[in-house]
Image (cartoon, helix red, strand yellow):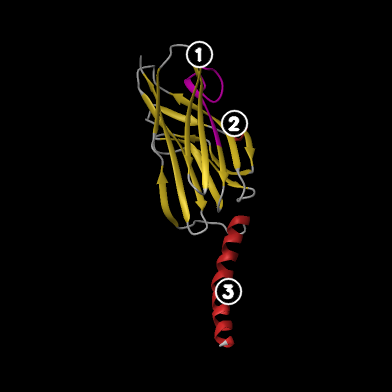
Amino acid sequence: MPMVGNWKTSLLLSIILPISLFVSLRMTGILSGPVAVSQTITATTLHWNMSRPMKYGIINEEIIDLYSDKNVSINLTLLVASYHENEPGAPSNGRDYVKVEVVIMANISKGFTHSISAGFSEMNEYATAFTSESCVYRAENLRVERIQNWGTGERATSLEATPVDSRKSWGIYISFAWIFFDSNDEDHSAVVRLELLHYDGVAFREISMPIELKVLTP
């Protein structure tokens, strides 16, 4: 009987140890690459719109999206900061644009964060969005891995990041310029989306939080 017990213990350890090693390597970033996502959770899309101004103005309107479960809680806050008409210099080079600031904070209760992506997408042909490293005002426990500076249409202007310590909470503060190419005669819409890849102790889940913005002709 003791030999049977030892055999069962050895079998159990042979299963647990490789899994524990795999999770540890993922958490420390030694083992990277694509992972199999077993569940995608998409939060309800929030909507915001305004009538397009005819001159520069401070807007300062917030859209706050919250997600929470037993493993993670996320606060995604958009501040539509200001509207700029025929703004000279980079990045708009004489075009109109809306400055949008994005603040994301996450508390991890169980498991770990694998990676995050945040950005602008789903714009029409008369608009683009821009961000850069200098637009990342603050990053706490996050390492910026890649920035797609420009995007239009379905192609996203985005930032991708991984946590320094994947088991701990993290936050980031970044701004985008949503630039218009038309002559104030087009309606514009875009989706700001956060995608968080989280491991809950059993499987990888993707949590997607979209916010739709619209700027409409007067």
Q: Which residue is mark 3?
A: 13
Q: Position of residue 72 (x, y in %)?
A: 52, 46
- The first of marks 1 and 3 along the sequence is 3
Three-letter amino acid code at disc 3?
A: Leu
User: Residue drawn at (58%, 58%), measured in percent from left and top?
Assistant: 26
What span is colored magenta in the figure? 87-104
Q: Which mark is residue 135?
A: 2
Compare marks 2 and 1 and give the one earlier in the sequence.
1
Q: Residue furthest top?
A: 55
Real-space Cα separation, disc 1 to disc 3, in angstroms: 64 Å
Task: Using the image, determine if residue 164 lies above or below residue 123.
Answer: below
x and y percent of residue 102 in the render? 53, 31
Q: Label 1's element?
A: strand
Of residue 79 and residue 218, the one placed in the foreground of this image is 79
Q: Is residue 137 magenta?
A: no
Q: Report the amino acid beneath label 2.
A: Cys
Say left or right for 152 vs 28.
left
**In whole angstroms, how far apart are the C-alphas of marks 2 and 3?**
48 Å
In the image as oriented, which residue stretches furthest toward the front?
Answer: 1
Q: Say above or below: 174 vs 53.
A: below
Task: Classify 10 Å Cα crowding around label 3: few (below 14), some (14-19), many (20 and above).
Answer: few
Rendered view: 145 above or below 2: above
- CB atoms at circles 1 and 3 under 8 Å apart? no
Q: Secondary structure at mark 2?
A: helix
Q: Quadrant of the N terminus?
A: bottom right
| Precedes in sequence: disc 2 or disc 3 | 3
- Label 1 amino acid? Gly
Q: Which residue in the protein does label 1 denote? A: 57
